[in-house]
Every structure is written in C-alpha cells, then in structure tokens.
Image (tube, rainbow, N blue to C red):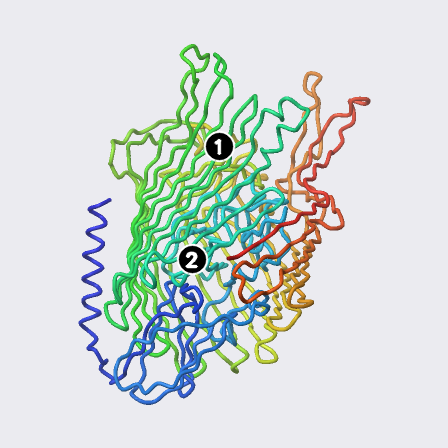
C-alpha cells in the first residue's frame, strides 16, 4: 500500500505540474484570479457549497468540499456577493488588477432563520447543473420530531422524495427502488458499511459533530463510484478555530457531548464528540433475573484534528469509533464501525487545488454464548478497507472547473468463523474462506457554461476490480451445485472486471427562476450484501464480484423542471427517472446465506428496472417553513430461477409515497414541528396454499413479493422551548418535547403465520408492530 501511495503521489504531482506549467500567473486571456476560503465568522468552520456571484458578469462559482473557491475574470472593478444558507450575504467591490487571495467569513443570520432554512441559497438550486441532489444542514434538523428524542440525520433523509425506509424505525433506506447496499455512505470520505445502532433505531451519525450532508440520488459525481443507487456524503466539523465551545444533550435513553476549540488560534483545531445510551442502567431494576443480568447499549466517538501549515497547505485527521453491545445470561452480541481519514489539502496556484487522502475503515460483528462450558461458542466476521485517493480541481475560467483524480482500495472480506471457546468444546472450528480484492478507478469531469443559459457537465469514470488470492473458486453446474474448484495462490490476480462509467448533465435556465435539467449516469457495483431480510441485520455479510458473480451495472436517465417563486421563498421541482440494471443479484428461495462456503450457489442474477416521478415543494423563509414530497414509482426484477422466471416487484417497490415536514416559529423561544408520512405497503412473500406431508402442514409460496403489508402512515410532533437569551451568559439551552407515532398507528413490522391450536386445519396471520405512541424529552445545550 505504501508503494501505491508513493506511485499515486508521483503521478498526481506530475499531472499537477503539467497543469500548473500550462497556466502563467495571469492566464493567457489576461484574466485575473480571485480565490480563497469561505468560513463561518463565529467558529471558523468552512462553508461547503457557499456561492460567489459577480454582479457585472452574472457568473458565479461555489466553494468545494473544503471551502475553497476560485474565480477568474478580465481586469476590472467588480461587485462580489458571497452567500450561504442561514448566513448574511457579504458584498465587496474589488478592483481586480492582479491575482488576489480573499478569505471570506460570513456571519450567521439570526438564529430563528438559521434553524428553519432548508435550501442552499437564492436560486442556487436553479443554476446548479446537478439534479437529484438534496442538501440538509444539521442545524436545520434539530426541530424535526425524532424517535426517542434523538436527532438522526438518516431519519431526515428518509423523509425526502425518492427515498423509502426499509423497515419501521430502521436506519436502512432505499433510493429509487435500490437496495440498502446500493447506497455508498461516506463519513469524511471513509466508507461506513453499517450506519445503524440498535438494529437501526438510531444511525451512527451524531448530529452535533456533523458539518454538511448531501444525498445524490443518481447524479453521482464522477469522483465517486461503486454503488448503483445513491451517495450519502457526510462531512464532520473541523472544530472551532475561534474559541473553546461545546454542545450536547440529555435525553430519555441517550446523552451526548461535543467539545471543540483551537489548539492554536486560526492554525490548529480539534473536535471530540461522544454519545452513549444508558438503557442498561435501568435493567437491574427489573424483577426478571434474565433482564436484570443483561446489558444493552451503544456508544460512538468522533475525533478530528486539523492544522493549517501555511496559506497553501492544510492537514486533517479524523476518525470514528462506534459499537453496539448486547449481553444476556444466554448470549452476547457486539458489532460496530471504525473509520480513519488522513487528508492533505494543497493549493498549487489560485486555480489549482489538490486533495490527497488516505482512508481505512472496518465493520465487524461477533455473536456467542455467555457461559464457559462445552456447549459455548463464538462466531465473528469483519470487512476491512484501506485506500488512497488523489483529487485535483482546476478552475479553468468563469463557471468552468476540471476535476480529475485517481484512487485505489484494498478490500478484505471475512465472511465468518465459528468455533468453540473451551478446550473441551463439542464444536469444531468452521471458517468460510476470506476473500481479497483491489478496486481502482480514475476519473475526469468538466463543467462549464455556454452563454447565459446553458450549462454542461460531462465526464467519465474508469474502474477496475481485481480478485486476488489466496482463494478457492468453486465452479457450479446448471443446477447451482458445486462441480469443481480451482485454488489460487496468495497475491495472485485471478479475475478482472473493468468498465467505463460515462456521466452527462445539462442545465438550461429558461429564466433566473426557471430551469430544465437532463442527466445520464452509468455506475458499476463490485461488492454487495447478502441478506434474507428487507429490514437488514447486523449479521448480514458483504461479498465481492468473482468469476461467478458479475458486477452490477445501472444506467439511469433523469430529467426535471425546477421553479422558484417569490424570490426563492418557494421552491418547486418535478423529476422523472428511468433506471435499467443488469446483473442484478437476488437469492434463491430459502437460501442459506450465513457461514455458507457455497454462497455463490445461492445467487440468482437477472435484470431489473426502476422508474418514477418525484414532486418536491419547499418553503424556505418566514415563520412557517418545511417541505412536502410525493413520489410515484415502480421497481421490478426478472430472473431465471426466481418466481418461475416471471417479472416480480423488487423488495422496496412502493408505488406511492408522501411526506410532509413543517416547522412553525411561534416566537423567539417557541417553535412547533410535525412530520406526516404515507407509503404503500412493503412487498412481502406469503404462503398462498398449503399441503400435507406425512401429517405435517407445509406452506406453499407462489409469487415472490406477491402480497403487501398494510399501507404505512405515521404522524410525529415536536415542541421546542428555548431558554432566555442573555448576552453575558455563554450557556444556552432548549427543551425538546416530541411524540413519535402520535395517533398510535400499528404499522406492520412482520407477519407470522401460525397454526390454530384449537383447529389445526386453520392457519392465521399474526401481525407484529414495534412502536405505539412514544413520547420523549431531550435537553440540548451549547456553551
């Protein structure tokens, strides 16, 4: 990996050198360059996606993921306006005679506006080329009603058009008919393979530690790949560079604390954030001995350090550690994520920006008995990634940017190992062989504007996936039975998959407040998850493409009409999409997925498609703000060996989905919020008939996903009471009272079919639901 890192660095430096040499200090057309970073004036955090608009030319740009911006113009005097949602605009007149560095600090708007604004600036949604992208600021989510009072970023994502929750209360989500494993989830660019705590009731993201969140529903930038459905890009805060500060909350089942501040003012900062549930503290009060002797909790820690070496160089280090623990007198379960990111930002010149990143992530779980006797056992599994990325941003002119980069990752899959824990164990060791793979990619993307109305974005991503030994590859016959096997040595590359992923976007601005957009995106997925449950499980395993498993490929075409009303106070959009997928993976009926050496024999592949229409309306200003979204969609699969070869609906096909999210500011200290959700019931396979075999009744399942649960709907409410604002007092607090499922809708979580004890000839369906009305209270504070 070190050799690859050095090689990538040499290549990147060579590319940057060529680009740098091609541009003199003032470019060939005589343009001058203004560049710098855009930050929060209060805490020094970079503002991702902040905009710069030049009044005289009508051109503009936005800051990248590290707050850097660059704009080139002919010499002259210009009026620059920097803006960002929730902040006051900053207007400066600059006589641009030579290149200049202008570091910008924007002042937050009054707190009431900061909390309720949900968009990204005046008409920015109209002018940007991207479509199918949703930006959510953590500050805007504090008032959204939450399960058990804990603000959750993924729960907010599930309220967006085109996004479906995979189960009641869960953190899994489906985007435009895709499966949860088709979502790439990144935390400071490191992959998070399981974003759930407490089997999905909470996500791994601590709202107090997050600076920025974007969801790409298909129009994924060329620098990202490896998933078919979406990209959820989450960025941690850098840490307050102005002063020491803190934030936190005390809730019904969890508490959290975040500390941040300068190690050296305006040069080095830190952020440390922790969260833990404490339900286990109350278990000893139970009269049930099993409950009394059990423990159930999760914790997570976020750490980030950054240092500004000089004006051109900055270093970042961030990490995450989280784990769920369940201990009972009978068994123990533990699972969790770890991520680590090391980044170097370098500015070669005002137009050329580089980010070099080293990444590591791991997800693991273990399950075993609690006692130490001959029947005791333990089962564990993990997945590890290590990788490097090099990204260059070349701002070639007004409204023009060239992005290019290289990346390489090493994957290690440990599907599972089970063994006895004592010398006298009755169990022998059983291990499913590990798998290893490299995943490489290079990309090139260019964005520019033609005239005043037309903007283009086009690029290509080239990816290569290599399976490497030591490995045993099984060969299967037409009945999916093992017929032979081949053994490959350690480090031997025994299989390659490669392909191009073109991506094109067009934006035509009919007026300043009206635009039509078109997009095409091809993506390839080389690793996927094996799961028998639509709700997902911590014990699900990831497995790679191989000689028996081809990579999944998706082509998505989308178009949309975007309109702003009353100077951006209202935003309305309609998007339509069609997605065709090849080599889609599903599993045979009654497939055995866990601890199975012959997992690939359970796989069935075919084609699938998803299409839909998404409506979204937002109100971004005033006392009443929020959004409403409605999605009409279908998702279908056709596979040999499943459903008799006939087309069937995909696991997350929900034709109708409606969400409404509203917040009303009653006064400076009081606000009310509400969410209402409705969705068509989730597809499910149920027995339609039964037959008797030797006196036993056996269910007969006919059509895959041929039935549905009842339609899902739920109302959540929230009341926020703020403390008095006292200028000399640094401590501020607020009480959040919320009610989940306010009218006690008993939404189906699972159906079980049981034989009637009084009449064995009859079978009845038993519905399991998770949540009645759940009130909660949380106290949030800042200092």
Secondary element type, mark 1: strand
Q: Quadrant of residue 396?
A: bottom left
Q: Calculate the distance from the C-alpha at mark 2 to the C-alpha at mark 1.
A: 35 Å
Up the image or down, 94 lies above or below 500; here it is below
Residue 46 in the image, given as x and y percentages of width and height: 40, 65
Q: Quadrant of residue 115?
A: bottom right
Secondary element type, mark 2: loop
Residue labelled with disc 2: 244
Query: What label sits on residue 540 in the rendered view?
Result: none
Taking the view exactly as shown, the residue that stands out farthest to the front is: 728
Would you say residue 405 is visible in this rendering? no
* In front of the other: 234 or 698: 234
Query: What label sits on residue 334 in the rendered view?
Result: 1
Up the image or down, 321 lies above or below 373; here it is below
Residue 321 in the image, given as x and y percentages of width and height: 42, 42
Which mark is nearer the camera, 2 or 1?
2
Going from N to C along the chain, the mark reached first, 2 or 1, is 2
Taking the view exactly as shown, the residue that stands out farthest to the top is: 424
Q: Residue at x 24, y 44 (%)?
A: 1
Would you say residue 476 is visible in this rendering? yes
Q: Quadrant of residue 683?
A: top right
Mark 1 Cα shell of 10 Å, populated few (<14), some (14-19), many (≥20): some
Up the image or down, 140 lies above or below 620; here it is above
* In front of the other: 129 or 591: 129
Residue 574 in the image, given as x and y percentages of width and height: 59, 68
Residue 645 in the image, given as x and y percentages of width and height: 56, 41
């Amino acid at each position: 990996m070190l050799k690859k890192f050095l090689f990538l660095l040499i290549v990147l430096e060579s590319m940057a050198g060529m680009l740098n040499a091609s541009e003199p200090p003032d470019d060939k057309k005589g343009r001058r360059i203004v560049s710098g970073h855009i930050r929060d004036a209060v805490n020094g955090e970079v503002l991702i996606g902040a905009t710069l608009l030049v009044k005289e030319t009508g051109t503009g740009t936005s800051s990248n993921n590290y707050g850097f911006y660059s704009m080139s113009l002919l010499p002259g005097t210009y009026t620059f306006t920097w803006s960002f949602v929730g902040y006051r605009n900053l207007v400066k007149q600059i006589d641009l005679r030579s290149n200049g560095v202008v570091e910008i600090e924007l002042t937050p708007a009054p707190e009431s506006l900061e909390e309720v604004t949900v968009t990204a600036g005046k008409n920015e949604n109209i002018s940007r080329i991207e479509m199918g992208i949703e930006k959510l600021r953590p500050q805007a989510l504090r008032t959204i009603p939450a399960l058990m009072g804990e603000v959750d970023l993924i729960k907010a994502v599930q309220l967006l058009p085109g996004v479906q929750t995979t189960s009641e209360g869960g953190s899994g989500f489906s985007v435009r008919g895709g499966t949860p494993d088709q979502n790439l989830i990144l935390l400071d660019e490191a992959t998070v393979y399981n974003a759930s705590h407490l089997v999905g009731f909470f996500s791994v993201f601590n709202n107090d530690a997050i600076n920025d969140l974007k969801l790409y529903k298909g129009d994924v930038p060329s620098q990202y790949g490896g998933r078919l459905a979406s990209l959820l890009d989450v960025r941690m805060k850098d840490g307050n560079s102005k002063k020491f500060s803190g934030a936190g909350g005390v809730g019904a089942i969890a508490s959290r604390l975040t500390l941040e501040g300068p190690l050296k003012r305006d040069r080095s900062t830190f952020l440390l954030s922790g969260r833990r549930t404490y339900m286990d503290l109350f278990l000893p009060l139970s009269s049930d001995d099993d409950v009394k002797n059990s423990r159930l909790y999760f914790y997570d820690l976020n750490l980030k350090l950054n240092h500004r070496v000089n004006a051109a160089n900055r270093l970042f280090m961030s990490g995450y550690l989280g784990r769920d623990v369940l201990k009972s007198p009978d068994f123990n379960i533990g699972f969790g994520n770890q991520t680590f990111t090391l980044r170097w930002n370098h500015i070669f010149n005002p137009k050329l920006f580089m980010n070099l990143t080293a990444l590591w992530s791991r997800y693991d779980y273990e399950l075993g008995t609690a006692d130490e006797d001959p029947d005791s056992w333990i089962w564990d599994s993990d997945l590890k990634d290590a990788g490097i990325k090099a990204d260059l941003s070349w701002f070639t002119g007004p409204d023009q940017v060239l992005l290019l980069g290289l990346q390489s990752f090493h994957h290690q899959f440990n599907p599972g190992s089970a063994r006895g824990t004592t010398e006298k164990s009755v169990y022998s060791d059983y291990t499913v062989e590990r798998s290893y793979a490299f995943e490489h990619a290079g990309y090139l993307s260019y964005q520019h504007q033609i005239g005043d109305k037309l903007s283009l974005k086009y690029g290509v991503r080239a990816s290569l996936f290599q399976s490497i030994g030591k490995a045993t590859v099984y060969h299967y016959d037409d009945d999916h039975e093992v017929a032979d096997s081949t053994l490959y040595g350690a480090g031997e590359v025994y299989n390659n998959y490669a392909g191009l992923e073109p991506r094109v976007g067009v934006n035509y601005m009919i007026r300043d407040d009206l635009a039509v957009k078109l997009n095409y995106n091809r993506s390839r997925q080389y690793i996927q998850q094996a799961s028998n449950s639509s709700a997902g499980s911590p014990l699900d395993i990831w497995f790679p493409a191989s000689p028996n498993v081809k990579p999944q490929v998706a082509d998505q075409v989308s178009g949309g009409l975007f309109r702003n009303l009353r100077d951006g106070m209202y935003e309305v959009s309609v998007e339509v999409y069609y997605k065709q997928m090849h080599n889609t993976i599903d599993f045979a009926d009654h497939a055995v997925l866990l601890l199975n050496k012959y997992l690939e024999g359970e796989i069935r592949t075919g084609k699938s498609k998803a299409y839909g229409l998404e409506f979204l309306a937002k109100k971004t200003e005033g006392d009443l703000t929020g959004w409403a979204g409605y999605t009409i969609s279908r998702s279908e699969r056709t596979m040999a060996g499943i459903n008799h070869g006939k087309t069937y609906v995909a696991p997350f096909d929900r034709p109708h989905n409606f969400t409404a999210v509203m917040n009303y500011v009653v006064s400076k200290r009081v606000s009310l919020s509400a969410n209402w959700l409705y969705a068509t019931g989730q597809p499910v396979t149920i027995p339609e008939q039964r037959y008797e075999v030797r006196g036993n009744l056996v269910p007969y399942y006919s059509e895959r996903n041929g039935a549905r649960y009842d339609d899902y709907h739920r109302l959540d409410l929230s009341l926020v009471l703020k403390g008095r604002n006292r200028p000399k007092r640094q401590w501020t607090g607020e009480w959040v009272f919320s009610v989940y499922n306010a009218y006690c809708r008993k939404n189906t979580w699972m159906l079980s079919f049981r034989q009637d004890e009084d009449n064995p000839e009859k079978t009845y369906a038993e519905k399991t639901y998770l949540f009645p009305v759940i009130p909660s209270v949380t106290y949030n504070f800042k200092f």
